[in-house]
């Protein structure tokens, strides 16, 4: 996965990341699970809470169908990671309850 200041994020990826924070997860944990900078994610959350657009300029629309598919799969992967964490915590809780 590409990292650093030249990394490009799609609008769908940004929105999915912000939604995870809005759902109650910490910026740090979401950023860690998405392998990105917490400061970048915090900036996105700030922009959404201020009612500003997530991306500057003309938007980050994928140029090809392949890029669109990659974007969709990344967003789904991020969502599934969140669901997996929730299920792991629930399983641990119920395992402790049954003892």
Image: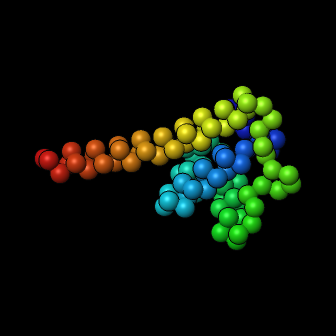
Colour scheme of the picture: rainbow
Question: Furthest residue to the front?
Answer: 65
Relative to 14, 53 lies left or right: right
Count of all numbered marks drawn on residues in the image? 0
Relative to 48, 27 lies left or right: left
Examine the rendering and report whether any part of residue 38 can be seen: no
Q: Residue at the location (71% across, 60% down)?
A: 43
Q: Position of residue 78 (x, y in %)?
A: 55, 42
Depth order, front residue of 75/88: 75
Q: Position of residue 5 (x, y in %)?
A: 80, 44
Q: Residue at the location (78% across, 31% down)?
A: 64
Quadrant location of the N terminus in the rendered image: top right
Residue 52 sits above or below residue 29 on the image: below
Residue 72 sits above or below residue 51 on the image: above
Q: Residue at the location (73% across, 30% down)?
A: 65
Question: Furthest residue to the bottom?
Answer: 50
Question: Furthest residue to the top?
Answer: 66
Q: Position of residue 45 (x, y in %)?
A: 65, 62
Examine the rendering and report whether any part of residue 64 can be seen: yes
Q: Quadrant of residue 27?
A: bottom right
Depth order, front residue of 12/93: 12
Q: Residue at the location (81% across, 50% down)?
A: 59
Q: Where is residue 32 in the image (x, y as percent from the top left)?
A: 57, 46
Residue 22 sits above or below residue 14 on the image: below
Question: Furthest residue to the left?
Answer: 99
Relative to 46, 79 lies left or right: left
Depth order, front residue of 68/21: 68
């Amino acid at each position: 996965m590409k990292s650093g200041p030249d990394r490009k994020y799609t609008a769908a990826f940004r929105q999915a990341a912000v939604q995870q924070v809005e759902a109650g997860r910490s910026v740090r944990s979401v950023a860690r699970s998405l392998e990105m900078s917490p400061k970048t994610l915090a900036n996105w959350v700030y922009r959404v809470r201020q009612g500003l657009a997530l991306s500057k300029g003309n938007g980050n629309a994928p140029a090809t169908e392949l890029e669109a598919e990659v974007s969709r799969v990344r967003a789904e992967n991020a969502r599934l990671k969140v669901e997996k964490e929730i299920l792991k915590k629930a399983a641990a809780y119920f395992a402790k309850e049954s003892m």
